Amino acid sequence: MNILRKMADIVMRRLTVREPDDWYSDAMRGDAGEVVTDTSVLALSAVWACVNLISGTIASLPLMVYQTRNGTREIARDHPLYRILHDSPNYDQTSVDFWEFVCASIELWGNAYARIERSNGRIVGLVPVAPALVSVRRLGNGSLEYRWTEDGKPYVETDRTMLHVRGFGGNPLGGMSTLTFGRNAFSLARAVDKAAGATFKNGMRPSVQLVFEKWLTPEQRALAKSKMTEEYLGAMNAGRPWIAEGGAKVEAISLNPEDAQMLQSRGFSVEEICRFFGVPPFMVGHTEKSTSWGTGLEQQTLGFQKFTLRRRLKRIEQALEKQLLTPQDRAAGITIEFNLEGLLRADSAGRARFYQQMTAIGAMTINEVRALENLPPVEGGDVPRMQMQNVPITEGDRETVRQIIAEEQE
């Protein structure tokens, strides 16, 4: 009975408590034998590029607070959350700094935390907390408790005083950590990098070898090594021809199959890492299979926006609305959304096509376009316009009849 009770306690603890991750334990050692930590993983160029790309792209998008009144949605610049989310969440960080930290935390640990600071019941700041420090558990009253220690000071907060953005997984206690589930792939990539570093540790690997028909005496071997070092490896003598004497032959050393396989493994590790983060390999500089999906790089970029960024943006937006908005805010039509038009800022041609189509169907006015381009309004630019030939089908026949009559009269 005691054994069964202990097993039940372990299962219940896993369901109700999420301890802070111990990155240096044997549990975080991959199959290749390398310990996986946040620092060691970010030392891999592919991981750094993926996390930097996703978090930097999301952080650069404007995070807006909107209010819908009488069917019209406007930017709620007077709302207290607008300055916090759009400009500066706390005294030390800009919005880009804060959201890069949040997104990087989600990508690596599967969770992002921020302590909510209030004054007179109003939210006045968000202070980020390193996810590796935080343990989460379900209390008897159903609320969540967050515990951590930072700079020697213990903190105990609840879900009413903490912003918790969960990554993939959907567990109320926390999302799934990419470091944990990808530890074998990351460990293999680390092992391959270390093997490559060991191969080239002393600079370039030997590119030539001296071949003698007979065994050398110790004196001859020492003389050959010293001459090789002086004549061939000397920096001042680089590029000079080697003079072989005493029956010696100079042979070039080609790349052996083991080294070639190591290079292929490094390329495969990049693709594996990109798979974990949902990033097309070409976007992190791996261009061996740049047209493996869609019709080319443009389609891969669109796919990255649709299938990688969109769900991350939605996850953050819903967490903010659920945890930061009050019932009064929801009743007043307050919503929080990222402005995806920020992705078009660097694409002048795509931006121009978008504006042209939106103004042609009357969905946007000229002044709305000018506002997005940071230009002053013009007189008459607030009137929606559309092409004259864009008329209902029933009106099309009448227009045709009028044209025929006009032509006959002429």
Image: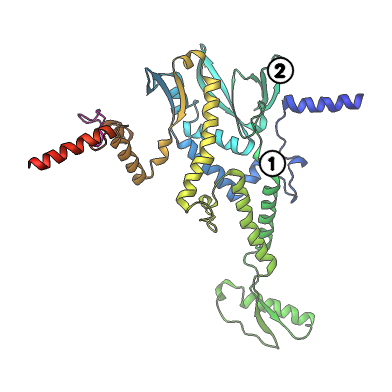
Residue at x 55% of width, y 77% of height: 239
Q: Main secondary structure of the magenta part?
A: loop
Q: Amino acid at mark 2?
A: Leu
Q: Taking 400 as reference, is 192 above or below it? A: below
- Percent position of residue 365, x then y: 28, 31
Image mark for residue 139: 2
Give whichever of discs 1 and 2 has the lower sequence position: 2
Image mark for residue 181: 1
Q: Amino acid at mark 1?
A: Phe
Q: Residues within 10 Å of mark 2 (few under 14, many from 20)?
A: few
- Local SS, label 1: helix
- How many numbered circles are shown? 2
Residue at x 29% of width, y 32% of height: 362
Using the numbered discs, state the Cα–Cα distance from disc 1 to disc 2 in whole angstroms. Answer: 27 Å
- Percent position of residue 67, x then y: 41, 20
- Percent position of residue 148, x then y: 67, 26
Report whether 46 appears left or right of 191: left
Residue 100 makes an appearance in the image = no
Residue at x 59% of width, y 43% of height: 277
Q: Which region shows up in magenta?
A: 375-387
